[in-house]
Image (cartoon, rainbow, N blue to C red):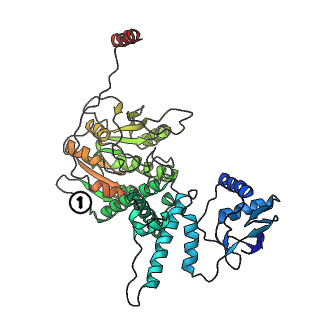
Amino acid sequence: MPIRRIDEVFVPEGRVRKIIDPQGLEDLIKSIQEVGLLHPPVVEENGALLAGERRFRALQCIAERGLTHHCNKKWLAPGLIMTTDIRDLTPIQRLQAEIEENTIRIDISWQEKSEATAALHELRTMQKAESTLPGLPPVPQTHEQTAAEIRGKPAEEVTRAEVRDVKADLYVQAWLAHHPGDKSVADAKSRAEALKMIELHLEDEHRAALGRRFVTQRPGKGHIIQRADMCQVLPDTPDNIYDVICTDPPWGRGADDWTNGTSLRRHTYQDDFHTFERIHLCLATHGFRVCKPKAHLYLFCAFQAFDELSKMFRASGWDVWPRPLIWFRPSGGIAPRPEHGPRNTYECILFANKGDKRVLTLKSDVLIYSKPAVDLRAAGKPVGVVYDLLSRSVLPGDEVLDPCCGSGPILPAANALKCRATCYDVADDAIGLASGRIDETYAHTEATVSFPTTRERAGMKVAKVAEG
């Protein structure tokens, strides 16, 4: 084994290992000093490191500290390193040396392991192609074979879990090969999270495809669903069409840069202030015009924007109710700073009137409905809260408008109330979701909240004393 100066060895670009744990490196340095270097790093003739990067990094630290170490019963002065040279190997064998050196290590990240597994799978397939007779197709490397080589055991002894891990690694790498800019998968905390993100992306792609194929129509129930920017459609819409506008536009809070609570589902629409201002100015002015002489507006909004939006809509002719309606979510909500403050469990709804339209029923300004059981889309609203709002204002046959329809909760609500809904959205995945709900009908049940009476509370205290 040749002895080189350590500065003659270098780590080439494109290595499997991307991250080296500092504490693990210190443990390795201590081990080398105590028991010596058992396996010298593998290098090529020009000094390029092929395998053993952690050992090489440890030896660099030892040299920088001016310490000696021993290998193969030889003591080496600071700055010297014993190596194993690899000569006359094919490119495939060289890649194999690096991969098999690193894939069995437990301290590499899941991204590195996934990348290495995919490389080993491709490597073995290339080797089989080299050994195949001319004119015959290569035999691909199976998942069982790849798992067996990674684990260092016969293929028949490989467990289902090990094969499943290999399949998952190959699946993630295949996705990243076709979506190289997908940071949500590449930077996921774990492989399980990466697979979940891929699943969500596939769902979104499927819904977007449905949206692109869905043709604007007014079927038996009379609904219209169209992929369109409301700021382009409403200015060309005739006057006096709609009885109610009920919608949840972007809030201008930058939600497209964060997750929806603990969900992995991302916002697929722009949520910057410019988009917020453009949409709400259009709603205030053209929304007022396209509504009938007597109409209502229900607008979901951030509480920070309620006063500003109230002034904007009043300036366009709307009579804005002075207090927001509150949608309370008993099943919980987002905790923006859990160590400093409470969980956000409610949202505000701006209620406005055109032409002094009367409500059909007197209801509370607090609406209690849990979030949707299935998170179809980020910031999605339950059908129950939309039904509750519409039931205050519409009669069978009325026209309702949701120009930012999202996953389309207004459609099941409109079906239950026998109304006709017009839905717009700029996103293909939203139109795909909404189009799938065109025949869905909401089965309404009243939400109730009860509090114990004074007598009941007194009884509870007595029961606790008796138990104690």
**Residue 154, image x, y percentages:** 43, 66
Identify which residue is drawn at 27% across, 62% down.
214
Identify which residue is drawn at 49% across, 48% down.
252
Quadrant location, the N terminus: bottom right
Count of numbered circles in the view: 1
Other-residue count near label 1 (Cα within 10 Å), few / some / many at <14 / 14–19 / ≥20: few
- Dividing the picture into quadrants, the one containing residue 97 is bottom right
Q: Nearer the viewer, residue 71 or 218?
A: 71
Task: Answer whether residue 304 is visible to the viewer in this image.
Answer: yes
**Image-based side of 124 in relation to 406, left or right:** right
- Examine the rendered structure and indicate whether residue 138 appears above or below residue 71: below
Local secondary structure at mark 1: loop
**Residue 135, image x, y percentages:** 38, 90
**Image-based side of 337 in relation to 33, left or right:** left
In the rendered image, the residue lying farthest to the left is: 220
Q: Nearer the viewer, residue 464 or 20?
A: 20
**Residue 224, image x, y percentages:** 26, 55
Residue at image mark 1? 217
- The three-letter code of the residue at mark 1 reads Gln
Q: Nearer the viewer, residue 195 or 453?
A: 195
**Image-based side of 338 in relation to 347, left or right:** right
In the rendered image, the residue lying farthest to the front is: 73
Identify which residue is drawn at 16% across, 54% down.
220
- Examine the rendered structure and indicate whether residue 430 appears above or below residue 117: above
Q: Nearer the viewer, residue 133 or 271?
A: 133
Quadrant location, the C terminus: top left
Task: Answer whether residue 237 is visible to the viewer in this image.
Answer: no
- Examine the rendered structure and indicate whether residue 401 appears above or below residue 353: below
